[in-house]
Amino acid sequence: MAIVNDLAAPSRPPSAMRRMGMWAAVHAADDFYQGLVLASIPYFVLERHYSYLAASGLTLAATLGSALPQPLIGLAVDRWRLPRLAAAGVLLAGAGYAAAGAAGPYALVWTLLLLSGLGVAMFHPAAGKAARDAAGDSVTAMSVFAAGGSVGFFLAPVLATPVLDAWGVAASVVFLPPAVLAAAVLARPGRVRAAASATVAAGPDRWRPFAVLTMISVVRSAVFSAVATFLGLYWIRHLDATPTLAGVALACFLGGGVLGTIAGGRFADRTGPVRAVRLGSALAVPVLIGLRLAPGPLSALPFAALAGLALNVPFAVLVRLGQDYLPGRPGTAAGVTLGLGVSAGGLLTPVFGQVADTHGTPLVFTLLCAVPAAAWALGLLLPTERRS
């Protein structure tokens, strides 16, 4: 097949971009289910009368499943090929979410979303390692893979809102086919194995900057997860919008994230990855302030898009830098930056859920305005030399 031949010929740029397109597509399918969890939360609250804390617990379930196992899975990917792991992961991610909407008891819903998150954890290290091999030295190419995940997040509220509006969360099963298709593509012989065989360690592992990078990723993820979790509820209960308009707001936020991921990769190729990390963190503060101060649901929509853009400018760059800092452990680096670092921020979502239950969602968004400054400050600790 053409894509298999491309994987065996990494020196041809057009082929490299076709490979990145395939990895971006399956990444979109995988992260589509993470986005569906966030898009479904307002409907769980409205249909089943969950509290804000219980709603944030659903985000926590998906986060625990995806965050905690990823470093160990990354180590396994670096040690063994595991060519079918990404395929099994995306299939589990889809099946867990598809069953959760039809489940009755809260504990069962929580467990199924935990399993869905575990599927995400199985996908990212293997796919991130293979995608880096396909991307070579280009941060822009790596941003194509990362943007695939952002596209999946973006498509989730776009596709879920009309379905959930019409049939409720029990309709979650209709979203299973993308997982089945992506798993079928990844399970074909040579799809992951050929790319993974190209990995070559270059230079020593640098754990100190990698630790700082991980902390930046956690801070960025904490803001992103909290905004994505409570944005729809903020639109409905503070800005007096309909659930449909709340879904539009979430789509604007996640769509901005797609643009931010691509823009961050291009900016990093031109000026250096560390500068891109600092820029995104700095831009997030004023746009979140604008979101909080916007007086109505329509005037706040541009700030939702800009917030997604700013928060995702560092996304692909963090993945690339992590693999630069740990050149001998690309699977581990991808597991931490794509998985643990990104998902662990969601572990803080119940804290914001408790704040929302006690004081309302406006205070949550007021607090979030200041958090990206911590990521910017941590960015000052990263070495600024540009590594190819």
Image (cartoon, grey):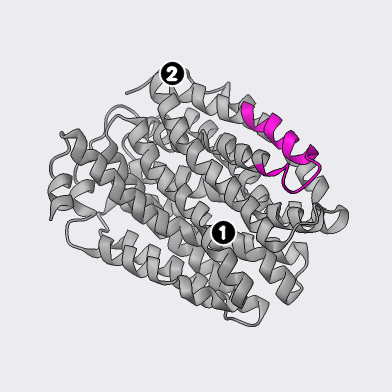
Position above or below: 79 against 97? above
Residue 376 against residue 8 in the figure, above or below: above
Whether residue 135 is visible here, answered yes or no, is yes
The x and y percentages for residue 132 are 31, 40
User: Is any part of residue 370 visible from this angle?
Assistant: no
Identify which residue is drawn at 32% across, 67% down. 181
Quarter where residue 81 is shown:
bottom left
Distance CA(mark 2)–CA(mark 1): 34 Å
| Residue stretch in magenta | 282-301
Q: Which mark is residue 217?
A: none
Q: Secondary structure at mark 2?
A: helix
User: For the residue carrying disc 1, how many other residues have a C-alpha within 10 Å: few (<14), some (14-19), or many (20+)?
Assistant: many
Residue 78: percent from the left, percent from the top?
31, 48
Q: How many marks?
A: 2
- Front in this rendered view, residue 266 or 317: 266
The three-letter amino acid code for the residue at tag 1 is Pro
What percent of the width, then of the height, locates residue 36? 54, 62
Query: Is 316 rendered above or below residue 190?
Result: above
Q: Nearer the viewer, residue 54 or 265?
A: 265
Among numbered discs 2 and 1, the one appearing first in the sequence: 1
Please indicate whether residue 366 sits to the left or right of residue 211 in the image.
right
Q: Residues within 10 Å of mark 2 (few under 14, many from 20)?
A: few
Q: Which residue is mark 1?
A: 157
- Does residue 293 show up magenta in the picture? yes
| Residue under label 2 | 271
Quarter of the N terminus within the rendering:
bottom left
